[in-house]
Image: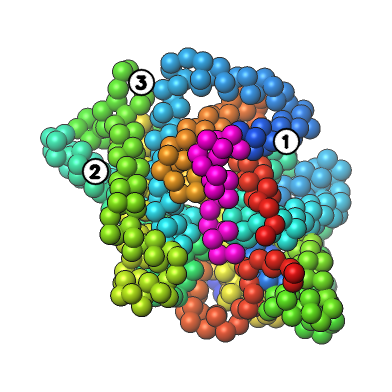
Amino acid sequence: MTTPLGLGVLAGAILSGTSLLYATLGETIVERAGIVNLGLEGIMLIGASVGFAVTVASGNAWLGLAAAGAAGGLANLLFGWLVVARRANQLASGLAMMFFGFGLSALVGAPYVGAVITGLPKWRPAWLASLPWVPGSTLFNYDILTWLAVPVAVLVWWALFRTRWGLGVRATGESPAAAFASGRNPAVLQFQALAAGGVLGGLAGAHLSLSLTLTWAEYMTAGRGFIAIALVIFSKWNPLRAIAGALLFGGAEALQLQLQARGADVSPFLLEMFPYLLTLLVLLAWGGARRLAAPASLGRTFYGSQ
Amino acid sequence: MADGGKRAAVWEAGPVRAALRYGVICAVALGVFAAVLLLAGKDPLKAYGDTFSYTLANAEGFSELLVRMTPLLLTAVAVALPARLGLINVGGEGQLYMGAWLASAGALLFPGLPAWMLLPLVALLGFAGGALWAAIPGVLRAARLVNETIATLLLNYVAPLIVSYFIFGPWRAKEGSAYPQSSAFAEAARLPSFFNTRVHAGLLIALAALMAYWLIMDKTRWGVDMRAIGGNPEAAKRLGIPVAAWIVIALGIGGGFAGLAGMGETMGIHGRLREGLSPGYGFTGFLIAWLAGGRPLGILFMAFLFAIITSAGDTLQITQGLPYAVINILLALILFTVLARKAAK
């Protein structure tokens, strides 16, 4: 029995949405600390390539996953050195990180083009496998990143909104001077947020290469980093809303893949445009409201209190 | 803080010292990049030496630098002009593809026209393709709905898909080539080239565009208006400058220049519409404009420098077996060095 289109899209939405959700959560933490990282696309590529290379070299996808997270975190610390320690312009630094990611991932991945991996193990609880259509689809047959995606979103929400650390991060994003005046160190908080966001961005990239495609290809993130930045705006800097956003955009990607797989009489190139155009449309619809929700000092450089 | 971000501070002490400083910056970046290549088990000295002997040591190599400079000059102006209004156009890549696409449409639809009609037509269409594509984020920004940085970035991913749709579909060449591409354009649509090299009339268009950019910005009332918006949009609005209209126009004209770059690549080099028209010329143009601080002479100098640097990407590919994309590391290192050297204020 073939899977109904709706179910196929939902299953695909969860798989494609996983990567988007981790990337969006990472960027949300960073932006809550007042920093825009346009280099997310590059961070994801670094995660995807490092994760894949380490998996092939060690034969262990778990090591690959850990290396991808570490590489993403380190790359974001480099970004932090520029925008926090050197007080460089955030947009230009973000684009520099994008170039860095393009190049570094190509260098790291080059020896592993065409390599075959089994990727992250997937499992499906037996009681879920007995539901109709489930055995024929990818539903509930997930790797650890997909199973943990929603819990991680809740964790990020809890860390940002229910802990002292999160309060400090958000205070830094609203007003670094006020955060400083209340005894916090904005630079340290921003570095911590960047490290956490980088790890999540690296994992987001690794999910693509270690679970979704099981290959490495140059530029394989195909703009997902930029879509995730748009998703942060869409979800109004809220990790829980980001779950819905990632599902919606994962769904857009899944729908175009499902239509292609079912031989719809539409050019695959036109279908591939859909997620990017949907992103623009959503930004358009949200355009008016976002100024109210954005951290007040987002994108501004804090020159200290002297 | 506001001005700090828009221009690299390197230019504040005049062109000679700026050139010296860029020498140091490039040396640092080249040094770090050499270390990266060494770590990857490659031979950086050979790579640099090969690049030098391929590009600067003989006439043919030098002509190829001019070929490469042509789209870079145009995509840099495409960034520099809107930047005077404080607009960040990171969509040169997509605008280049749309210019190539619309120019190709003209060349394929009117193959019978004489060159004196067809050439201006395809040039105009190339400009229009990029301009209309850039006008989309322009309108969204002017209406204060979507930030132009993210909109131009997203549209970069859409434009090549439009080109692919046409060359895999309606425009695909009949003469059985496995390679997806349009049919060859009529001779009349081809930009003339010079001295038996691949240097084509697009270079003259690019230099004229740079000239026009300088004249408009520094010598006309329009330039004053645009710079006023870049300085303080609120004040400009109170002075009666139509800020929203200027945003659309500036992004449109910028996109038009990037579109001309795409037109030049198809009409001057390939003679057909193909995939992979640009190895990131749009992004490299952004770097050039930003590093040059939007100054016309700086753009000329930087475009030449980046033509050499991106040639090194080809060298890495040919002699060291590395993907071309690795050259992005060197571009990033140059940017990192410039960004990091800015003294804390």
Could you say where residue B109 lies in the image, as x and y percent from the top left?
Answer: 20, 45
Between marks 1 and 2, how big is the CA–CA gap? 43 Å
Subunit bearing disc 2 = B
> Quadrant where the C terminus of chain A lies?
bottom right
Query: Pointer 1: what residue?
Result: B32
Main SS of residues in magenta? helix
**Labels 1 and 3 touching (C-beta < 8 A):** no
Check if residue B19 falls in the magenta segment.
yes
Q: Chain of mark 1?
A: B
Question: Farthest residue toward the top?
Answer: B58
Q: Marks 1 and 3, how far apart in space?
A: 35 Å
Q: Position of residue B51 (x, y in %)?
A: 58, 23
Q: Secondary structure at mark 2?
A: helix
Mark 1 vs mark 2: which is more N-terminal? 1
The kind of residue on which mark 3 rests is Thr
Q: Nearer the viewer, residue A255 or B2?
A: B2
Q: What residue is drawn where x is 82% and y is 54%?
A: A70
In the image, what residue type sits under mark 1? Val
**First-in-chain label (1 vs 3):** 1
Q: Rounded to the nearest whole Å, what is the CA distance between mark 2 and mark 3?
A: 22 Å
What residue do we see at 47% from left, 32% from top?
Answer: B304
- Percent position of residue A6, x then y: 56, 74
